[in-house]
Image (spheres, rainbow, N blue to C red):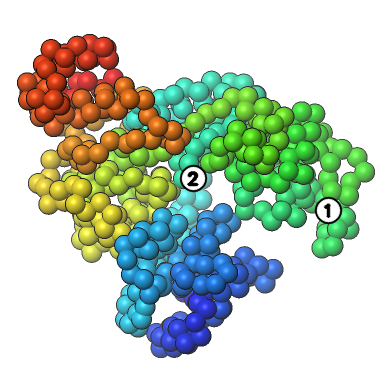
Amino acid sequence: MTGSILIVDDDPVQRRLVEAALTKFGHSAIVTDGGEAGLDVLDGPNAREVSVVILDLVMPGLDGIGVLKAMRERAINIPVIVQTAQGGIETVVSAMRHGAFDFVVKPASPDRLQTAISNALKVEAVEDEVKRASRRRGGGHLTFKDMITRSPAMDRVIRLGQKAAASNIPILIEGESGVGKELVARAIQGSGDRRSKPFVTVNCGAIPDNLVESILFGHEKGSFTGATDKHTGKFVEANSGTLFLDEIGDLPLDVQVKLLRAVQEGEVDPVGGRSTIKVDIRLISATHRNLLQQVKDGKFREDLFYRLNVYPIFVPPLRDRRDDIPYLVRHFMEKVAPTDPRRRLAGISAAALAMLQAYDWPGNIRQLENAVFRASVLAEGDVLTEEEFPQIRAQVEGTVNLGAEPTSAVANTVADAPLNEDEVADTTGPALSDDETTVRPQPRFGTLRALDERGNVRALADVELEMIRLAIDHYNGQMSEVARRLGIGRSTLYRKLKEYGIDPEAGRVDRLAS
């Protein structure tokens, strides 16, 4: 173990109990009495080395969910075990959605706590080894051929990204947290003429407001308290290359003014500096927020918005590209395999894969990667089953038959071989062949989404079309039964199919997908 275990709890009795349990099992502990104090240990001026956090969810001031959010914003990737006296599924789901590794219900037995800690340390150790192995492999530039996707929903993203790579205009990448906005930005940079130049990333949401200007534009020695040395800033660091400003919607208004000038004029003013510095950068911004609404609310400058939004690219959430899940699962399993060749997984069961495709993944690809990584490290057998995904199973149980017989070749062989270059590169190719049919819920949980990916009510025609497709698939293309179940005549059903540009003779829904 490389660091201590941080206990964050406002209850002094609970703190002493947990600390005693940790000491008994040979761990060193750091004890804090609230969320703010816990964050100071993780990311304050005197931050200490921490391997695992044991976090109470219900606390005055900054509560457990608030701590989890702050850790994500600051990119603090330390396993968190949440403690709660409220063991309901909603509490657990909320904590897991915000990045918790595991949970225990108070009062937790020492053995249960030790199991959770051991699992967390084991996952962290493998994760560190994966990062080291990745650094050792090094080299090469990420391009769109490296993106693992077979989903039609990503075709537009790739087409727009490839066109953008050939120009130098500002790009704004929109999408929910965890969908892979930085991956798209790196593919753009790796496909353009700046591929061999610096790629500098800044998470605007993770920088304290009083330091944003200094970090972006630099500062002179002595320009403010604590400025003991000259700092060049990210714009200068990225000169001749690409600057990726993630979560740009979190920038303070006063910094937005200087950013506008930097984008317009290609020059920056360091804090305390007497002259401007010319920079030549390719600017790519990203946000999970609705920047236009931010403009209307007075939280984002309109002139800056139109400067950044020259070439928008929207990355769809994982729930709208479920076809990608089998390929992503295999890729994430392969990332774990080299760390321990003796425990190479043979694959994932059809039921487990169906369950993963059933879940909506509010944390998107980042959440899927964490779930697969955790399951791969902690699995007892050589095949991942639904038992390795207890939190996901708790949320989808009852909506998909987890005891179904395996119906997918890819489900049973998902880790039999590493992804080859053709598989990774084929981003626009066909879906899985008939003998590699993706496991999908049948039907898709008997529900239809009322809202689109931007939170707007879907058009009635879209919902109607989805219902017709679902019915055709559910009743195996028996059109008379489909019409009867939909409560319409067979001739009306055929007329509607023609209105939607679908060949009514095509039959099954897999031939309706366009």
The residue carrying pointer 2 sits among few (fewer than 14), some (14 to 19) or many (20 or more) residues within 10 Å by Cα, namely some
Residue 219's spot in the image, x, y percent? 82, 50
Question: Can you tell which mark lies on residue 267?
Answer: none
Q: Nearer the viewer, residue 191 or 408?
A: 408
Residue of label 2: 177
Badge 1 marks a residue whose secondary structure is loop
Residue of label 1: 230
Q: Nearer the viewer, residue 53 or 431?
A: 53
Residue 41's spot in the image, x, y percent? 60, 72
Q: Please state if 480 lies on the left or on the right of 346 as rendered.
A: left
Could you tell me the amino acid type at mark 2? Ser
- Which residue: 56% across, 37% down? 290
Residue 451's spot in the image, x, y percent? 38, 35
Badge 2 marks a residue whose secondary structure is loop
Looking at this rendering, what residue extends furthest in the right direction? Answer: 274
Mark 1 vs mark 2, foreground winner is 2
Looking at the picture, does residue 150 appear above or below residue 355?
above
Quadrant location of the C terminus in the rendered image:
top left
Question: What separation in Å lies between label 1 and label 2 (alpha carbons)?
Answer: 34 Å
Q: Do callouts 1 and 2 mark residues in contact (Cβ within 8 Å)? A: no
Q: Which of marks 2 and 1 precedes in the sequence? A: 2
Q: Inspect this view and state whether residue 135 appears.
A: yes
Q: Please state if 291 lies on the left or on the right of 510 as rendered.
A: right
Looking at the picture, does residue 510 appear above or below residue 317?
above
Residue 115 falls in image quadrant: bottom left
Q: Please state if 377 lies on the left or on the right of 232 as rendered.
A: left
- Which residue: 62% across, 28% down? 309
Looking at the picture, does residue 111 appear above or below residue 235?
below
